[in-house]
Amino acid sequence: MEKATGDNLTASSDTLAKETGIKQTGTKGSSTPHTSWTTSITGAIDLPATHKCAIVVDQEMPIGFIANTASVLSLSIGKQHPEIIGQDIVDNNGDPHQGITILPVPILKATALLLHKIREQIRPYEQELTVVDLITATRTTQTYVQYSEKMLTTPVEQLGYCGIALYGKKKLVNKFTGNLGLLR
Protein backbone atom coordinates (compact mmCIF):
# COMPACT_ATOMS: atom_id res chain seq x y z
CA MET A 1 0.00 0.00 0.00
CA GLU A 2 1.26 3.50 -0.80
CA LYS A 3 1.97 5.92 1.99
CA ALA A 4 -0.55 8.74 2.38
CA THR A 5 1.86 11.68 2.23
CA GLY A 6 2.41 14.77 0.10
CA ASP A 7 2.09 14.38 -3.67
CA ASN A 8 0.62 10.88 -3.69
CA LEU A 9 -2.38 11.88 -1.57
CA THR A 10 -4.94 11.10 -4.27
CA ALA A 11 -3.46 7.72 -5.19
CA SER A 12 -3.01 6.82 -1.52
CA SER A 13 -6.55 7.82 -0.64
CA ASP A 14 -7.91 5.69 -3.47
CA THR A 15 -5.72 2.76 -2.48
CA LEU A 16 -6.65 3.19 1.16
CA ALA A 17 -10.36 3.28 0.39
CA LYS A 18 -10.12 0.20 -1.82
CA GLU A 19 -8.03 -1.87 0.61
CA THR A 20 -9.57 -0.89 3.95
CA GLY A 21 -12.86 0.88 3.36
CA ILE A 22 -11.40 4.09 4.84
CA LYS A 23 -11.78 7.26 2.85
CA GLN A 24 -9.53 10.21 3.66
CA THR A 25 -10.07 13.69 2.37
CA GLY A 26 -7.91 16.76 2.79
CA THR A 27 -6.14 19.61 1.10
CA LYS A 28 -3.38 18.49 -1.23
CA GLY A 29 -0.23 20.56 -1.09
CA SER A 30 -0.93 22.47 2.12
CA SER A 31 2.04 22.93 4.46
CA THR A 32 0.44 20.55 6.97
CA PRO A 33 -1.64 18.32 4.73
CA HIS A 34 -2.58 15.76 7.36
CA THR A 35 -4.03 18.07 10.01
CA SER A 36 -7.17 18.86 8.02
CA TRP A 37 -7.96 15.28 6.98
CA THR A 38 -11.02 13.48 8.15
CA THR A 39 -11.29 9.74 8.19
CA SER A 40 -14.49 7.79 7.81
CA ILE A 41 -15.12 4.07 7.70
CA THR A 42 -17.38 3.18 4.82
CA GLY A 43 -19.84 0.34 5.12
CA ALA A 44 -19.49 0.04 8.92
CA ILE A 45 -22.32 -1.59 10.82
CA ASP A 46 -24.08 0.82 13.18
CA LEU A 47 -23.44 -1.29 16.29
CA PRO A 48 -22.79 1.59 18.69
CA ALA A 49 -26.38 2.75 18.36
CA THR A 50 -27.92 -0.62 19.12
CA HIS A 51 -25.40 -2.75 21.01
CA LYS A 52 -23.25 -2.44 24.07
CA CYS A 53 -20.38 -4.25 25.70
CA ALA A 54 -19.63 -3.85 29.40
CA ILE A 55 -17.23 -5.54 31.78
CA VAL A 56 -17.96 -5.77 35.49
CA VAL A 57 -15.10 -6.63 37.85
CA ASP A 58 -14.72 -7.30 41.54
CA GLN A 59 -13.50 -3.92 42.76
CA GLU A 60 -11.88 -5.46 45.84
CA MET A 61 -9.29 -7.43 43.85
CA PRO A 62 -5.70 -6.15 43.59
CA ILE A 63 -5.06 -3.97 40.51
CA GLY A 64 -3.13 -6.73 38.71
CA PHE A 65 -6.05 -9.15 39.01
CA ILE A 66 -8.44 -6.45 37.83
CA ALA A 67 -6.30 -5.74 34.76
CA ASN A 68 -5.96 -9.45 33.99
CA THR A 69 -9.70 -10.04 34.42
CA ALA A 70 -10.59 -7.16 32.08
CA SER A 71 -8.13 -8.35 29.44
CA VAL A 72 -9.28 -11.99 29.56
CA LEU A 73 -12.94 -10.97 29.32
CA SER A 74 -12.21 -8.52 26.47
CA LEU A 75 -10.35 -11.15 24.45
CA SER A 76 -13.16 -13.63 24.96
CA ILE A 77 -15.88 -11.20 23.86
CA GLY A 78 -13.75 -10.24 20.83
CA LYS A 79 -13.46 -13.90 19.86
CA GLN A 80 -17.23 -14.35 20.04
CA HIS A 81 -17.99 -11.09 18.21
CA PRO A 82 -15.26 -10.19 15.71
CA GLU A 83 -17.66 -7.65 14.16
CA ILE A 84 -16.97 -5.30 17.09
CA ILE A 85 -13.32 -5.05 16.09
CA GLY A 86 -12.71 -2.32 13.52
CA GLN A 87 -10.74 -2.85 10.37
CA ASP A 88 -7.02 -2.18 10.24
CA ILE A 89 -6.11 1.47 9.68
CA VAL A 90 -3.07 3.53 8.74
CA ASP A 91 -1.52 6.56 10.37
CA ASN A 92 -0.50 9.75 8.57
CA ASN A 93 2.82 8.15 7.60
CA GLY A 94 0.95 5.32 5.90
CA ASP A 95 2.04 2.81 8.54
CA PRO A 96 -0.53 0.12 9.39
CA HIS A 97 -2.19 -0.35 12.79
CA GLN A 98 -4.43 -3.24 13.84
CA GLY A 99 -8.13 -2.50 14.27
CA ILE A 100 -9.46 -1.99 17.78
CA THR A 101 -12.94 -2.20 19.22
CA ILE A 102 -15.53 0.06 17.59
CA LEU A 103 -17.56 0.13 20.80
CA PRO A 104 -16.65 1.74 24.10
CA VAL A 105 -16.08 -0.96 26.72
CA PRO A 106 -16.69 0.49 30.17
CA ILE A 107 -15.08 -1.32 33.08
CA LEU A 108 -17.61 -1.23 35.89
CA LYS A 109 -17.19 -2.11 39.54
CA ALA A 110 -19.09 -4.42 41.85
CA THR A 111 -18.46 -6.51 44.92
CA ALA A 112 -17.92 -10.27 44.69
CA LEU A 113 -21.37 -10.82 46.18
CA LEU A 114 -22.99 -8.49 43.64
CA LEU A 115 -21.14 -10.19 40.76
CA HIS A 116 -22.57 -13.54 41.84
CA LYS A 117 -26.05 -12.04 42.04
CA ILE A 118 -25.74 -10.43 38.59
CA ARG A 119 -24.48 -13.72 37.12
CA GLU A 120 -27.53 -15.56 38.40
CA GLN A 121 -29.92 -12.82 37.18
CA ILE A 122 -28.43 -13.00 33.68
CA ARG A 123 -28.99 -16.75 33.20
CA PRO A 124 -32.54 -16.46 31.78
CA TYR A 125 -31.27 -13.95 29.18
CA GLU A 126 -28.32 -15.91 27.82
CA GLN A 127 -30.10 -16.52 24.50
CA GLU A 128 -30.14 -12.75 23.97
CA LEU A 129 -26.77 -11.82 25.48
CA THR A 130 -23.23 -13.02 25.15
CA VAL A 131 -22.02 -13.61 28.70
CA VAL A 132 -18.42 -14.39 29.56
CA ASP A 133 -17.56 -14.96 33.20
CA LEU A 134 -14.25 -15.49 34.90
CA ILE A 135 -14.22 -17.38 38.17
CA THR A 136 -11.73 -16.98 40.98
CA ALA A 137 -10.20 -20.37 40.13
CA THR A 138 -7.91 -18.46 37.73
CA ARG A 139 -5.90 -17.49 40.80
CA THR A 140 -5.23 -21.10 41.82
CA THR A 141 -5.06 -22.96 38.52
CA GLN A 142 -2.23 -22.91 36.02
CA THR A 143 -3.84 -24.38 32.91
CA TYR A 144 -7.15 -24.11 31.12
CA VAL A 145 -7.76 -27.80 31.81
CA GLN A 146 -7.40 -27.20 35.55
CA TYR A 147 -9.66 -24.15 35.30
CA SER A 148 -12.26 -26.20 33.42
CA GLU A 149 -12.14 -28.93 36.06
CA LYS A 150 -12.73 -26.36 38.82
CA MET A 151 -15.70 -24.98 36.91
CA LEU A 152 -17.11 -28.46 36.47
CA THR A 153 -16.62 -29.66 40.05
CA THR A 154 -17.53 -26.52 42.03
CA PRO A 155 -21.22 -26.16 42.93
CA VAL A 156 -22.61 -23.13 41.10
CA GLU A 157 -23.67 -21.45 44.34
CA GLN A 158 -20.03 -21.64 45.51
CA LEU A 159 -18.47 -20.10 42.40
CA GLY A 160 -16.71 -16.82 43.02
CA TYR A 161 -16.48 -14.38 40.13
CA CYS A 162 -13.60 -12.08 39.26
CA GLY A 163 -15.65 -10.49 36.51
CA ILE A 164 -18.37 -10.77 33.91
CA ALA A 165 -18.50 -9.37 30.38
CA LEU A 166 -21.81 -8.72 28.65
CA TYR A 167 -22.48 -7.98 25.01
CA GLY A 168 -25.86 -7.50 23.38
CA LYS A 169 -28.63 -5.02 22.83
CA LYS A 170 -27.89 -1.86 24.76
CA LYS A 171 -31.17 -1.87 26.69
CA LEU A 172 -30.61 -5.41 27.97
CA VAL A 173 -26.97 -4.82 28.93
CA ASN A 174 -28.05 -1.66 30.77
CA LYS A 175 -30.68 -3.66 32.66
CA PHE A 176 -27.86 -5.48 34.45
CA THR A 177 -25.15 -2.81 34.50
CA GLY A 178 -26.88 0.56 34.36
CA ASN A 179 -26.66 1.21 38.11
CA LEU A 180 -22.97 0.26 38.45
CA GLY A 181 -20.21 2.83 38.73
CA LEU A 182 -17.13 3.08 36.57
CA LEU A 183 -13.97 1.56 37.97
CA ARG A 184 -11.56 4.44 38.59
Image (cartoon, rainbow, N blue to C red):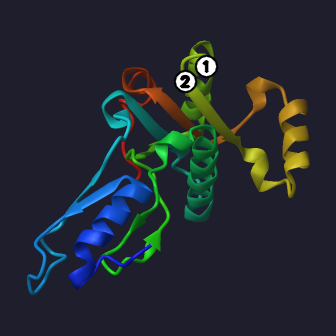
Q: Nearer the viewer, residue 95 or 83?
A: 95
Q: From the viewer's perspective, is 9 left or right of 123?
A: left
> Where's residue 144, x and y in %?
85, 49
**Residue to which mark 1 is pinned:** 126
Q: Nearer the viewer, residue 77 or 111?
A: 77
Q: Quadrant of the C terminus?
A: bottom left
Instruction: Look at the picture and state if 62 lies above or below 129.
Output: below
> Where's residue 4, x and y in %?
30, 76
Residue occupying the point 39% across, 44% down? 103
> Where's residue 67, x and y in %?
56, 60
How packed mark 1 is, by other alpha carbons closer than 10 Å (few <14, some 14-19, many 20 or more), is: few
Q: Nearer the viewer, residue 168 or 5?
A: 5
**Amino acid residing under circle 2:** Leu
Looking at this view, name the residue that lies furthest to the bottom.
Answer: 31
Q: Nearer the viewer, residue 118 or 106?
A: 106
Instruction: Look at the picture and state if 1 lies above or below 182.
Output: below
Residue occupying the point 58% across, 25% down? 117
Q: Is residue 49 visible?
A: yes
**Residue to which mark 2 is pinned:** 129
Instruction: Look at the picture and state if 101 lies above or below 33.
Output: above
Q: From the viewer's perspective, is 89 left or right of 58?
A: left
Instruction: Look at the picture and state if 90 lies above or below 102.
Output: below
**Amino acid residing under circle 1:** Glu
Choose top left, top right, bottom left or bottom right for residue 95: bottom left
Choose top left, top right, bottom left or bottom right for residue 43: top left
